[in-house]
Each structure stands twice: as C-alpha cells, then as structure tokens.
C-alpha cells in the first residue's frame, strides 16, 4: 500500500458518485487502517461566522465560507498553518485539527491560512486502493497554495495538469488550456 497522505485525490471524469463527482480531496491520513480526507472544492453557502453564530451562539474572527468535506458526518474541522494548534501535519507547514480546544483557539485567533469543513471523506482498509484499481482517482502532490487558493475550476485545472503532464511539463500548461 502506498500512502496518499499529503496528496490531492482527483476524481476521474467517470466517477459519477454525487459525493465525489469532480471532487478534489486533500488526503489527511492514509495507512493500513484506512484513509481520511476532506473535499476542498465544495464550498457551502454559509460562512464560518454564520455557522459559529448558529451552532455555538457566539461570533468568531474567521472569515470565509464553510466547506463540505465529504459524506461522512463530523463536527467542525480545519486545515490551517498554525503549528501550535495542529494535531496532524498534512504537508510541511499545513496542519489538520479536530480537537475542540484547538478549534476554539483558531476561531478566536485565526491563522494566516485556514479552511473549515463539516463532514469528511473516509475509506476503510483497502477500499481506496480498490477505487484506484477501477480508475476512479488520480493523484498529485498537494501544495499550500492550492489548498488555500481559489477552488473555482480546480478540478478542471488539476485534471488537465495531471493528464497533460505525461507529455508537457506542468509549468508550461496555462491555467485555462482553452486559451492555448
């Protein structure tokens, strides 16, 4: 088993499961016990501030929208750059947190880069590997710029990059290949 931790899973165009169609999943954990990630390109129509007011009855200092991390139910979780409040390092300098105390600290004192999620994507032992065998996913290394950057057209950009990189160096692929 080769771990996908710290990579993006890019849904294949033939993956039609509505939970994952055109999804980009940041893999937080992947070992013999299973895999966990969050879909980074599913923003919700509610801000983190609105969610805090509705669920916690209090305000927070965090801007931005809340994201739907996947079909598995979970309370609030965050990908961020604050090492002191990081539970697991996903890639160098980017951390994953679910602990209530750390979340409260991050809500009151936001890190420079943060993305909040409700729900996650999870796979049991061997399940994700079986999905790779059917061609449901491709992977590419995750970067902080892409994790925290704009999500519009991210699936198209990464899918194009991964497929074209077999023939063209990725730095030569324009953001929008249709203008080529």
Image (tube, rainbow, N blue to C red):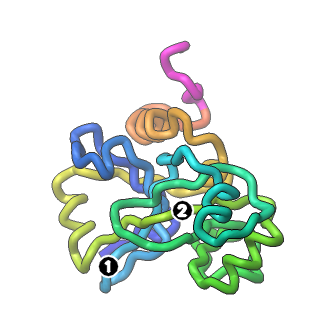
In this figure, which residue is indicated by the disc labeled 2?
117
Which residue lies at the image location 24% right of the left edge and 51% below the top edge?
Answer: 136
Q: Which residues are magenta?
A: 172-180
Quadrant of the snapshot with the N terminus: bottom left
* Image quadrant in which you'd find residue 85: bottom right
On screen, residue 95 versus residue 23, left or right, reads right
Residue 177 is a magenta residue: yes
Which residue lies at the image location 31% right of the left edge and 85% below the top edge?
Answer: 33
- Alpha-carbon neighbours of circle 1 within 10 Å: few (<14), some, or many (≥20)? some
On screen, residue 117 versus residue 21, left or right, reads right
Q: Nearer the viewer, residue 133 or 42?
A: 42
Q: Position of residue 100 (x, y in %)?
A: 62, 83
Which residue lies at the image location 49% right of the left edge and 60% below the top edge?
Answer: 26
Q: Position of residue 90 (x, y in %)?
A: 57, 71
Q: Position of residue 173 (x, y in %)?
A: 55, 29
Q: Is residue 13 above or below residue 115?
A: above
Q: Nearer the viewer, residue 60 or 142?
A: 60
Which residue lies at the image location 29% right of the left edge and 44% below the top edge?
Answer: 12
Q: Is residue 166 visible?
A: no
On screen, residue 3 versus residue 177, left or right, reads left
Q: Would you say the residues marked 1 and 2 are in contact, meaning their CB atoms lie under 8 Å apart? A: no
Q: Nearer the viewer, residue 26 or 116?
A: 116
In this figure, which residue is indicated by the disc labeled 1?
34
Q: Position of residue 177 (x, y in %)?
A: 50, 21
Q: Is residue 141 visible?
A: yes
Q: Nearer the viewer, residue 125 or 44?
A: 44
* Image quadrant in which you'd find residue 155: top left
């Amino acid at each position: 088993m080769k771990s996908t931790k710290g990579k993006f899973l890019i849904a294949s165009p033939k993956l039609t499961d509505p939970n994952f169609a055109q999804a980009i999943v940041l893999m937080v954990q992947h070992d013999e016990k299973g895999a966990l990630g969050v879909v980074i390109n599913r923003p919700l129509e509610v801000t983190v501030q609105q969610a805090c007011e509705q669920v916690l009855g209090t305000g927070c200092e965090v801007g931005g929208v809340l994201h739907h991390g996947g079909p598995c139910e979970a309370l609030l979780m965050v990908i961020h750059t604050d090492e002191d409040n990081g539970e697991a390092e996903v890639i160098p300098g980017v951390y994953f947190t679910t602990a209530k105390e750390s979340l409260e600290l991050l809500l009151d004192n936001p890190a420079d880069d943060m993305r909040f999620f409700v729900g996650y994507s999870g796979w049991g032992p061997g399940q994700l590997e079986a999905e790779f065998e059917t061609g449901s996913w491709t992977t590419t290394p995750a970067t902080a710029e892409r994790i925290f950057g704009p999500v519009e057209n991210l699936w198209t950009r990464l899918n194009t990059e991964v497929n074209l990189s077999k023939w063209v160096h990725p730095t030569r692929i324009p953001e929008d290949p249709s203008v080529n």
